[in-house]
Image: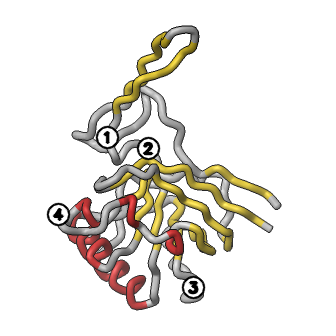
């Protein structure tokens, strides 16, 4: 089995969505050991959006079903569309999804969508997907991944009440 880490590493010079807080890591000594203080936005690096990102009463990231985070996933290079077989899709060389494509994916039963871009789509696309509790994973590193089917494990930090969380995402290939 081969394991691919498709997460973006967190570091001070990393690309962030315009207007989001910058990533800061401050090392410090704590007695005889060393620790670091972190400052970052919930949408920093590879991250998972929850419905609470757009809906104040929406499900928060700590309540996302594991069935949508540990799941077979199809990786497709844009502009190709996925087959209708899988409930999770990751878009490589992603461009923002149009409402038409987002609606088509919903009709095909997709429950988890990811991309290697800063955003899966505009505000309207986010609202459509998150209203249906589709898990959105953004800022993946799919550069070394071939199109195909993998087992995905995408785990956000368990930040209670949060609209999103950085995540470590791996793909397993048999």
**Considering depth in this image, is 18 or 58 the residue closer to the camera?**
58
- Crowding at mark 3 (Cα within 10 Å: few <14, some 14-19, many 20+): few
Between marks 2 and 4 in the image, the one whose residue lies nearer the viewer: 4
Between marks 3 and 2 in the image, the one whose residue lies nearer the viewer: 2
- In the rendered structure, find residue 56 and report the number of the disc placed on it: 4
Looking at the picture, does residue 129 appear above or below residue 62? below
The C terminus - image quarter: bottom right
Q: Which of marks 4 and 3 precedes in the sequence?
A: 4
- In the rendered structure, find residue 116 and report the number of the disc placed on it: none
Instruction: Give the Cα separation between the discs numbered 1 and 2.
Output: 9 Å
Q: Secondary structure at mark 2?
A: loop
Q: Which of marks 4 and 1 precedes in the sequence?
A: 1
Q: Which of marks 2 and 3 precedes in the sequence?
A: 2
Estimate the x, y position of residue 158 in percent, counting from the top left: 43, 52
- In the rendered structure, find residue 45 and report the number of the disc placed on it: 2
The part of the image, by quadrant, that contains residue 34 is top right
Point 34% across, 53% down: residue:
160
Q: Secondary structure at mark 3?
A: loop
Estimate the x, y position of residue 118 in percent, counting from the top left: 38, 51
Between marks 1 and 2 in the image, the one whose residue lies nearer the viewer: 1
The part of the image, by quadrant, that contains residue 130 is bottom left
- In the rendered structure, find residue 83 and report the number of the disc placed on it: 3
Estimate the x, y position of residue 48 in percent, counting from the top left: 41, 57
Report which residue position mark 1 lands on: 41
Between marks 1 and 4 in the image, the one whose residue lies nearer the viewer: 4
Q: Which of marks 1 and 3 precedes in the sequence?
A: 1
Q: Do callouts 3 and 2 mark residues in contact (Cβ within 8 Å)?
A: no
Q: Secondary structure at mark 1?
A: loop
Instruction: Give the Cα separation between the discs numbered 2 and 4.
Output: 23 Å
Q: Do callouts 2 and 4 mark residues in contact (Cβ within 8 Å)?
A: no
Q: Which of marks 4 and 2 precedes in the sequence?
A: 2
Seen in the image, is 124 located left or right of residue 70? left
């Amino acid at each position: 089995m081969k394991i691919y880490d498709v997460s973006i590493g967190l570091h001070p010079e990393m690309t962030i969505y315009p207007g989001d807080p910058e990533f800061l890591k401050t090392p410090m000594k704590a007695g005889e050991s060393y620790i670091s203080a972190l400052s970052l936005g919930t949408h920093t690096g590879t991250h998972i959006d929850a419905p609470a990102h757009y809906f104040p009463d929406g499900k928060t990231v700590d309540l996302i079903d594991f069935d949508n985070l540990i799941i077979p996933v199809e990786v497709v290079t844009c502009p190709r569309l996925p087959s209708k077989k899988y409930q999770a899709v990751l878009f490589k060389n992603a461009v923002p999804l149009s409402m038409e494509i987002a609606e088509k994916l919903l009709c095909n039963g997709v429950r988890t969508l990811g991309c290697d871009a800063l955003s899966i789509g505009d505000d309207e696309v986010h609202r459509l997907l998150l209203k249906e509790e589709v898990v959105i994973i953004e800022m993946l590193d799919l550069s070394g991944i071939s199109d195909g089917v993998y087992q995905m494990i995408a785990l956000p930090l368990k930040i209670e009440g949060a609209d999103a969380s950085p995540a470590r995402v791996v793909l397993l290939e048999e």
